[in-house]
Amino acid sequence: MIKLQNVTKTYKLGADDQVIALDDVSVEVAKGEFVFVVGPSGSGKSTFMKLLTREQLPDDGEIWVAGKNLASLRSWKVPMLRREIGYVFQDFKLLENKTVYENVAFALEVIGRPRREIDKRVPEVLELVGLEGKARSHPHELSGGQQQRVSVARAFVNYPRILLCDEPTGNLDPSTSVGVMKLLDRINRTGATVVMATHDQHIVDSMRRRVIELDDGHVVRDQSRGVYGYGG
Amino acid sequence: MTARWSYVIREAFVGLRRNLMMTFAVVLSVTVSLTLLGASLLLSEQVDLATDDWTGRVEVSIYLCDDRVCPAITPEQQEELRQDLEDQEVVAEVFYESKQDAYERFTSMFSDQESLIEAIDRDTLPASFRVRLENPNLFNVIADQFSNYPGVEEIVDQREVLNQFLRFTNVIRTAALVVAGIQLVAAGVLIANTIRVAAFARREQTGIMRLVGASNWYIRLPFVLEGVFAGLIGALVSWGLLWGTVPQVANSLSRDIELMPFIGEAQVIAVGPWLLLAGTGIAAVSSILALRRFLDI
């Protein structure tokens, strides 16, 4: 489902100054897997996620996502790639002037899905995340955990094959985080591949899923049923 | 398909409403530039109309001596001159204008300026042969051949008078076009800036759209439409302004100046589509350019 082969990504800071974000990284994620990407700030997690949605292109190496070679993917086909990927942000990124229902519907509306389909899918996915009673609320009326559930609903409403989560529990307290993780786990069990970048040691340790640890642009650990740190 | 278009149009109007002052500025600047553009286009129409009318009438005037500058022409000389003129191949038509005819033409031309008429004696204006040429450019042939005839005082190419007028109107038209062009560029820059502000104000929304896989045109079209709509309004207002003023100005001028035909409503209506095209075109181009850097994938 996701494959990185000898991927290198550097950022230019000046004329001859550069930062290596990812250095010769090779990773493969199979269909239906649940993967944590962990590591300290600046280890390359964000770059890793941005490469998968083709917000950025690598300097070297090949990336395959959902059967597409991102290096040779035409820019006008990038939207098609992103329709197969749901994206959950740390800061939710909900539109304040829209209701919960409208926020979720927005993701279908802007890819041109017909109204009938929108009216069928949005209630379905709101039920999945347990917010069917909050459809008419605005984001500011919800708790952080509820807002993140809306964000997950929006990411999943198009039934993407891949769900990318960038620190989804970063702004939540531990008990709320557990609820969001259960939701992600349930989505994973529907067959979606989930890749989650996180700092949250408790969550990684309690879930016991595959862990890819990045440090200074290198994969320093790739462990199935792993924990956050060494010796844990 | 209906869901798509309702989204695009709704978003465009949201942008226009949120940004009323900027929208107003855009409409105003498009209006000013297109009114100038329209005015200069209409001026060209007017010049063409007058030129067409005049070139058919332009003649060579051969003024005859009447003892004041040179010895008066004798009837025999006058008859010989007429014969020789009529024998010329380039001459289409010759007719004689007596002192009396010249005076009458003068008084009818300046009928509303009595002081001017009083200053002119019945005897002041010279008699002349007025010659229409097959090809007005062949003036020199006539001038060279007949200026030394006895009894000929002066040969005047009336096209020279027309040319002076044309040069004058050309300067005005070019100036109006240049100012309109500069204004149009300014309007384009203003539109680009407005659209950029609008896109920036909704960057959260467009960011989400990009990540859920909205196509480029779907993200950009509301903004482009926002610009085009403002441009369209500006074009319509300028069309209305021209429509409301130009026919009336032309009408009142035509009452004073009987020498030439004037443009009317038909020409103002005909210039409208060009204004709409220019207004929406400029708006579309500057909006797209403004978004190209801003909303890249």
Image (spheres, coloured by chain):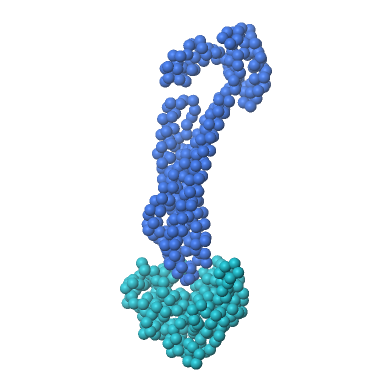
Chain colours: A cyan, B blue
Q: Is residue A133 left or right of residue B188?
A: left
Residue pictured at 48% horizontal, 61% vertical: B220
Observer-nearest residue: A212 or B49? A212
Regarding residue B158, the answer to whether it shows in the image is yes
Residue at horizontal 43%, vertical 46%? B31
Which of these two is toward me, B108 or B187?
A: B187
User: Where is A216 relative to B229, above or below?
Assistant: below
* On-image quarter of the N terminus of chain A: bottom right
Residue extending farthest to the bottom is A231
Which quadrant would residue A135 be assigned to in this image? bottom left
Q: Is residue B24 left or right of residue B92?
A: left
**In the image: residue A144, left or right of residue B96:** left
For the point 57% across and 23% down, which residue is it? Answer: B158
Image coords of residue B226 (percent x, y) = 43, 56
Q: Residue at x 46, y 77 (%)?
A: A166
The percent position of residue B284, horizontal first and vertical second, equals: 49, 54
Residue B158 against residue A84 in the figure, above or below: above
Closer to the camera, B50 or A64? Answer: A64
